[in-house]
Image (cartoon, grey):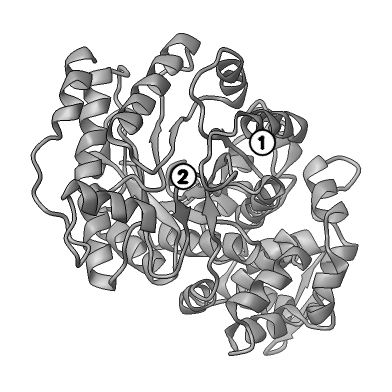
Amino acid sequence: MYATSIRGTRYTFPDLKSLMAKATPLRSGDCLAGIAAASAAERVAAQMRLADLPLSTFLREALVPYEEDEVTRAIVDGHDAAAFASVASLTVGELRDWLLSDAATDETLAALAPGLTPEMVAAVAKISRNQDLIAIAAKRRVVTRFRDTLGLPGRLSSRIQPNHPTDDPKGILASAIDGLLLGNGDAVIGINPASDDLRRCHELLRLIDELRETLDIPTQSCVLSHVTTTLRLMERGAPVDLVFQSIAGTQRANRSFGVNLALLREANEAALALRRGTIGDNVMYFETGQGSALSAGAHHGCDQQTLEARAYGVARLFKPLLVNTVVGFIGPEYLFDGKQIIRAGLEDHFCGKLLGLPMGCDACYTNHAEADQNDIDDLLTLLAVAGVNYVMGVPGADDIMLNYQSTSYHDVLAVRRMLGLAPAPEFAQWLESMGAMDERGSPKPLALPAAVLPLLAKA
């Protein structure tokens, strides 16, 4: 039992799970689950009580039972007590204060990361202002490598997302080339296939790999099929760079995605064995999003922000190249409006970075949410200030296959220019060699490279 009093009113919370849920800033998913604070006063009371909670409490009281959940077991069994020692005596509030201090540098945060559990960083997020989330995350750089180097200071990378409702090769190729000429694609050229058909996914992989090889692009490709499909593709000799999978923060939620930790380990090992990376071996690509466990009926009564942080506990087991929260994709049932989407995006980036992950964000919304492109402009700019590793480049910011709104190639250029950011160094050098970027990092008008004309004709 956890309790606190405010102006003569006593608020009680039966367990840590309830305290965490009640302390969470308002969002529609927790209301839908019936676990949100009943009032702003109760929320403040829960946040005050949470701020005074010793961090060690999270090592004694599991929110999702250890015996029932392999995610909990991975978090508990993998906890680094030596790394935790430097903050073991602190409360949640004291950790927040330390994270905001000059003592918390990129180096000290990197050393601390293995000692922090997802629940600890989720708790800190709940008592932090948006400005805190930005200021703390901006200190942390997580660098990964495959064919180029992602996450360096002063860099903002992007995924080209050239989706097509019928997987039309010509449409996908045209969208990808458009993105490349606008300086996008250093994180990955990643296609969400309209179907998980093995033959079609193989064709799309060959298409993008041929484009990459033709132009000698220092980036990586990915067809975002289910991990079991990707395993079959690797068995057939398909040019698989990265293994993609959506993941969540509980065993039951991951089961709803058709995965478990053993399957992810198998896929990771298979991709590593291909040795397709030229400068690094980070081969996994994970996507997450607040509300996925609740939508699968697998949330164990926990709030969605905490479970999202637990998904990052899964991701860091595999040293991924890319992780991103698709923050507004599930819909207004989970994040109702622009304000909730912005807050969730900043929380997710903050939690992922503190846990040592190369965090990106698909700053997005569905058309039935109370949000618009101005909200996404705000989130994109705030994330760039916070040091996000990468964002999405979608033609016109409108994904015509998945039917949602995201960020465009031009949005990426605008934020880079405003904040003085550049693509990954190897990719920037390639753009300069192609004549597509000037010495200030601005795109230059460029005719369609002659080498891609046969690809378009064949597609």
**Closer to viewer: mark 1 or mark 2:** 2
Q: Residue at x 88, y 47 (%)?
A: 66
Does 356 appear above or below 284? below
Q: Residue at x 80, y 74 (%)?
A: 55
Residue 418 location in percent, x, y?
A: 23, 70
Q: Residue at x 38, y 43 (%)?
A: 218
At label 1, counting other C-alpha atoms closer than 10 Å, the crowd grade (few under 14, some 14-19, many 20 or more) is some
| Residue 389 image-quadrant placement | bottom left
**Which residue type carries mark 1?**
Gly
Who comes first in sequence, dot 1 or dot 2? 2
Residue for badge 1: 297
Residue for badge 2: 147
Residue 334 location in percent, x, y?
A: 50, 48
**Which residue type carries mark 2?**
Arg
Viewer-closest of 396 and 434: 434
Position of the N terminus by quadrant: bottom right
Residue 421: tell me if it is visible.
yes
| Residue 83 image-quadrant placement | bottom right
Residue 364 location in percent, x, y?
A: 36, 48
Residue 42 location in percent, x, y?
A: 64, 73
Which element carries disc 1, helix, strand or loop?
loop
